[in-house]
Structure formats: structure tokens, C-alpha cells
Amino acid sequence: MQLQVKGRNTSVTDALFDHAEQKLERLARIMPPWDDAMTVELELSVEKNPKVERPQIAEVTVRTKGPVLRVRERADDMYAAIDQAARKLERQARRYRERRKAHGGRAPGGEAPPPAPDEAEPPLAIEDAEGEPRVMRRKAFEMKPMTAEEAALNMEMLGHEFYVFRNEDGDVNVVYLRRDGNYGLIVPG
């Protein structure tokens, strides 16, 4: 496991780094053995607005050969935020491992890791009339063919409410979380 810790509006002390390393080390034991090359990125930040409750934020992104796991936790103390994020990640990793076993031992989406979104692209700026919404950010990523069940698993691991994917026929589909807790699937007409 490779751990990267960076701070935004705060400095990363040796004590914070050691605490994060200790808490996230357990994650390596939970993940399947074929995910030994996973990278863990921890971003620690502090909200400067005094009206914000729980201003200490720990955001963790785990890149594996399967789905990307991501959590964001807030607390009054940075150590508590790291602890909460680590516990949440452990639950996600256990759920991922159990789902992987349920799918016959193969990784959802195949053996290759999903490509990371291209964060280096500049935001997409669209001229707008006064007061109109505009697109502020653009993400580009490669879509490998997968089933709707694999897409739902990836969506759940990311903690998103929808997931765009390419089905086995090559068509772009969207799986989304319904209000009743089930999943919906949008297919082209």
C-alpha cells in the first residue's frame, strides 16, 4: 500500500501522518490479495469559515485494481476525522470483498484498474447569460464495458447517486440510486 498525505489550509505533521498510516494500514489486510498495489491518497483540510460545524475534513481516495473507494468525513478534530474515514473505508472494503466473492471470485469490471478521471484538464467554461447555471468542471475517463450490476457496485463504492458506463453492446448507460433504495437503469432509446 502506498500512502500519500497532503494538507490544504493545514500542515501535515509527523504525528498526523503516523496516525493516518496506522489507521489505514488495516485496509491493506481487508482488501483482496490481488489488490496489493493499491494507492491511498489522504487529503486533510480545514474550513476557515467559523460558521461551519466540524471544520476538520479528511478525504480518502483508494485506487485499486477494481473500483475506486472514496470517503469524506468531517469532525471537530483531525484525528477523529481520520478515524471516521478509516472506519467507513473498512466497511466499503469488506462489502467490496464480499461482493467479489459472490461474483465467482472475479473482480467487478475485469482485472484492470479503472482509469482515474483526468483531473489535469482545465474547467469547461461556457458563457452564460446573467444568473444562468454553467458547467464549472469537466471530467474525462475511459469507459470499459461492464454489466449493470458491476456499474452499481462501482457507483456504491464511490458513494455517488449515479454512474455512467458502457454496457457489453457498447452503448452508454446510466445506473442511478432510486429514492426507494433500489437501482434504476437508463438505456438509449
Image: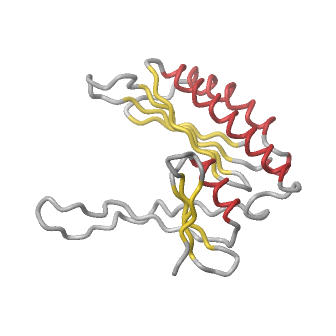
**Residue drawn where x is 33% and y is 67% of the image:** 124
Residue 65 pos. (x, y %): 74, 56
Please determine whether, in this image, residue 42 is positioned above or below residue 13: below
**Residue drawn where x is 59% and y is 55% of the image:** 183
Residue 31 pos. (x, y %): 78, 42
Q: Quadrant of residue 108?
A: bottom right
**Residue drawn where x is 79% and y is 62% of the image:** 111
**Residue drawn where x is 79% and y is 57% of the image:** 107
Residue 146 vs residue 187, the one in the foreground: 187
Q: Quadrant of residue 121?
A: bottom left
Viewport quadrant of the N terminus? top right
> Please, which residue is most extreme toward the left here?
130
Please determine whether, in this image, residue 43 is positioned above or below residue 75: below
Residue 13 vs residue 168, the one in the foreground: 168
> Please, which residue is most extreme toward the right here?
104
Residue 76 pos. (x, y %): 43, 18
On the picture, is 20 further left or further right than 75?
right
